[in-house]
Amino acid sequence: MSRRGTAKKKTEKFDPICCSRVVNMLVNRMMKDGKKSLAYKIFYRAGIGIRKETKKNPVYVLRQAIGRVIPSVGVKIRKRKKGKKGGKTYKIPVAITIPQGILLAIRWLIEASRKRSGTSMVSQLRSELIDAASKKRGNAIRKKEQTHKMAEASRTFAHFR
């Protein structure tokens, strides 16, 4: 048993230009091989494109996109063992907290923008954020709807929690 006590929650730092924690969270998850400056360049260039296309603040568009992609229900897998071997796996619907939902939304936005067709990550991220912020169909929104459908289908196993 640990004697150190509980760990304190770390708050995300602000990014240097926009002074937004959400931007910093996005950049940290977009970063590959520790190249944070490149991830910042990608986001800021995408922000310039968003500003030209929508005439809105890119941080506002990012927050709007995350707000539309946040799932309210997720699915966890539980195993019910009977005897020594085998058992059954059930998908159990679970409510998702807001910080967890924000992380999932950011992860889905980045994943969807990487899969998108485009010349560069800047254009892919820009178009994915604009699609998710407006009511157009983006892959991140599809992922959210897919998760909700899975949770709805496995609603009968909710008592296994």
Image: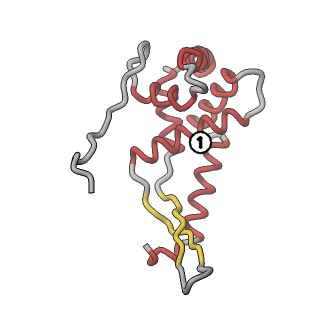
Measuring from the top left, give residue 106's x and y in whole percent.
53, 37
Q: Quadrant of the C terminus?
A: bottom left
**Residue sitting at 57 percent across and 29 percent down?**
30
- Left or right: 42 as drawn, with respect to 1: right
The residue tagged 1 is: 108
Q: Residues within 10 Å of mark 1 (few under 14, many from 20)?
A: many
- Left or right: 94 as drawn, with respect to 42: left
- Tell me which corner region of the image, top left, top right, bottom left or bottom right, holds residue 148: bottom right
Q: Farthest residue toward the bottom?
A: 83
**Residue sitting at 60 percent across and 25 percent down?**
33
- Tell me which corner region of the image, top left, top right, bottom left or bottom right, holds residue 19: top left
Measuring from the top left, give residue 58's x and y in whole percent.
51, 22
User: Along the line of sight, which residue is nearer the eye, 19 or 91?
Assistant: 91
Measuring from the top left, give residue 110's x and y in whole percent.
61, 34
**Residue sitting at 23 percent across and 46 percent down?**
4
Amino acid at circle 1: Trp
Question: In the picture shown, does residue 132 fall above or below 118?
Answer: below
Q: Report the number of numbered marks.
A: 1
Can see residue 114? yes
Measuring from the top left, give residue 23's x and y in whole percent.
47, 25
**Residue sitting at 26 percent across and 40 percent down?**
8
- Left or right: 87 as drawn, with respect to 93: right
Question: In the picture shown, does residue 82 fall above or below 117?
Answer: below
Can see residue 55? no
Question: In the picture shown, does residue 83 fall above or below 79?
Answer: below
Q: How is the image coloured?
A: secondary structure
Question: Which SS class for mark 1?
Answer: helix
Q: Quadrant of the N terminus?
A: bottom left
- Left or right: 56 as drawn, with respect to 5: right
